[in-house]
Image (cartoon, rainbow, N blue to C red):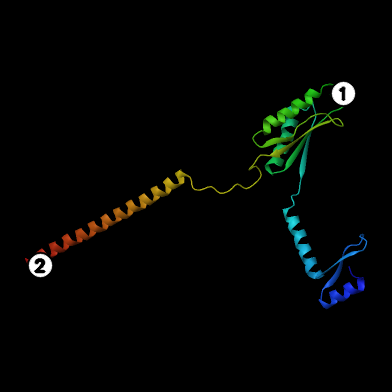
Amino acid sequence: MVTIEEARDIARQQNLDLVEVDPNARPIVCKILDWGKAKFELSKKEKAAKRHEKTLEIKQVKFRPGIDDHDFDTKLGHARRFLEEGKRTKVTVMFRRRDLRRPENGRKILDRVVEHLGPLAKVETKPLRIENRDLTMVLVPMLGVGHALPSRPPTPRSRSTSKRVGDDETKAAVEAGAVEAGAVEGKGAESDAIEGGTAE
């Protein structure tokens, strides 16, 4: 343990900085280091943490227990779009005072939503009880929904198509060669005929 003045002298001799680490400790804790470098490293760590931080965005769709089919389909379309965009979706059934007598009607609405959106989502938070006249569940997209899927290798059909194209090209080349050979052969026959006429 040294005095502040001695610590400053040591830091000055090493061309470093005297940094206060814990001002509430008694005695005060300080550290001798390169403050510019330490500040840079701290900034790098903060930026890396922000890159790995996921922003949680939740969309909400609200229903009524006595909602008609047209409005139900409209709101269901909103929920489907949110899930396809890869976002968590909160589905809420709002009760009026008189609706609280039949809470099962609200659960039927949520069951219908799950039935229609089953291929796209799974239930993350189940509707347990009515709170503040609301019955709520949270849906999360299934794996692969709303995200780019990895590229797939060529299917057998694609490979077979390429093979057929190659076969057609080979066949065309063979036929071209046959025509060319026939042309040469015909030319040779014509030459024989001319030579025969000359000989006569």
Label annotation for residue 198: 2
Of all residues, the one furthest to the bottom in this rendering is 13
Where is residue 195 drawn, in percent x and y? 12, 65
Left or right: 145 as drawn, with respect to 185: right
Q: Nearer the viewer, residue 166 or 154?
A: 154
In this rendering, the answer to whether 4 lies above or below 133 is: below
- Image quarter hosting the N terminus: bottom right
Label annotation for residue 98: 1
Where is residue 42 drawn, in percent x and y? 78, 62
Neighbour class for label 2 at 10 Å: few (<14), some, many (≥20)?
A: few
Label annotation for residue 167: none
Say what amino acid the circle numbered 2 marks.
Thr
Q: Quadrant of residue 29?
A: bottom right
Of all residues, the one furthest to the left in this rendering is 200
| Residue at 68%, 37% in the rendered image | 121
| Residue at 75%, 25% in the rendered image | 108
Mark 1 falls on what kind of element? helix
Is tag 1's residue or tag 2's residue first in the polypeptide sequence?
1
- Image quarter hosting the C terminus: bottom left
Q: Quadrant of residue 114?
A: top right
Where is residue 54 drawn, in percent x and y? 74, 50
Left or right: 158 as drawn, with respect to 65: left
Left or right: 88 as drawn, with respect to 153: right
